[in-house]
Amino acid sequence: MKTLILYSSYLGTRKASYYSDWLDAFVRCNYFDITALNIVPSFLKVPNSSKYQNPRDLHLSRHTTAYQLLYQSYTFFYRRLLPAFIKHHLLPSMRRMREWDLIILLHSTNANSMLALSSIESYLKSRKGKLLIFVGNEYCLMPEKIRFIKNVEADYVASQLPEKAAKWLYEDCTHSRIVLVPHGLNSKIYKPLRDPLSRRVDIGFIGDRYSLAVGDIERTKLAEYFSQNDFWPGMTKDIRIGRKLRLPREEYARFLNTIRGTIGGESGTYYLEKTDKTQKEIEAFLSYHPKATFDDIYNRFLTNYSNPVSGKAISSRHFEAAGTKTCQILLEGEYNGIFKPDVHYICLKKDYSNIDDVIARFRDNRYLQTMVNETYEYVMENHTYERRVVDIWEVVS
């Protein structure tokens, strides 16, 4: 199948491992005759042109900062540069749009900005073959993403969400078939290099401190809880919280091979929205009250939130740990029905009330070794990116 894959690779994307993992898996698959094209200048960060804009029918004021003015100036400059880049680097492929049997838009093209995709929307609408879009970060920019999907009449929408949430989120995309495609394991990168019991660090974690606008701080609180407490004498930890501390995938794979266990929870938000309304309201509030706590946000915006739709899901980080045979202590959750509590991970209740039992299980070498071995075999058999790509082939062929 003659396939055009569009992706975005630019400053900062090296630390988003799954962007590259998906592209690598498609390129390696013999079912697809791949041409891959980067749709953005690699030497510049792609701005989110909607960052300081309000959704339709929502009028919010924001406290203007020097950073906002600088960001908007950079966005203005980028908007002027993009047409020239498209003309010189993308136009030949865009003019051949009707030659492709399948066009795939990877997560990186839309996760944090719709600027580049929107600029080539007219070309995508002129296609003759099918179009599949992997939607990244399904908790932000949803009005723009849904509008784009409808405008190009995407044939397939690949969602990371559980089925109920995905069907609700994209129910207005009537021309599109929703395909449930969670992340997976890149077994070429994330593999066990050292026996788990011989690793020098007991508990390790590297991750962002997410914006309060997402609606929960469970993972950050968990990382801080483990960072601030020693659960047995001589416990060793390597816990790093912050965006600038994240590592490229090869370095992160090496990090995982130095730790016996890691901690985490489901990705996404408990308050999935098609409009981004609540998230924008919180961001506007934070612009005037930058020192507001999560309790302030929760009490003001979320306490009386009616009928929330959860967008919590399993993430690539869970598969990466499994691939390196690193034991996972995870907050209780559904994990798309893929990971089962106390089978594939040690389940920690959200109030930490079973922490003593969790630590006892983690320190039981036989229990830990059995869990990581069985989880590794399970993921290798069922949840690699190679397997995901074959599943995609079966849908689109």
Image (cartoon, rainbow, N blue to C red):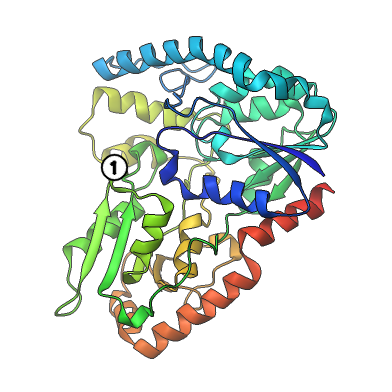
Check the image and name the residue furthest to the bottom: 366
Q: Quadrant of residue 233?
A: bottom left
> The N terminus lies in which quarter of the figure?
top right
- Asked whether 236 or 302 is in front, the reply is 236
- Asked whether 5 or 202 is in front, the reply is 5
Q: Quadrant of residue 149?
A: top right
Q: How many badges with numbers are in the image?
A: 1
| Residue that label 1 marks | 244
Q: Does the image show residue 275?
A: yes
Q: Is residue 227 left or right of residue 160?
A: left
Residue 377: % across, % down: 57, 77
Check the image and name the residue furthest to the left: 233
Q: Is residue 5 left or right of residue 243?
A: right
Residue 205: % across, % down: 31, 60
Q: Is residue 216 above or below residue 385?
A: above
Q: Is residue 22 left or right of residue 248?
A: right
Q: Is residue 2 above or below residue 63?
A: below
Amino acid of disc 1: Lys
**What residue appears at the point 47 percent right and 46 percent down from the top-left corner?**
269
Q: Does the image show residue 310?
A: no
**What residue appears at the point 65 percent right and 69 percent down from the top-left corner?**
382
Label 1: how many Cα within 10 Å (few below 14, some 14–19, many 20+) = few
Residue 21: % across, % down: 55, 51
Dot 1 lies on which element? Answer: helix
Residue 105: % across, % down: 65, 36
- Asked whether 18 or 362 is in front, the reply is 18
Q: Is residue 345 above or below residue 17?
A: below
Q: Is residue 10 left or right of residue 355?
A: right
Q: Quadrant of residue 121?
A: top right
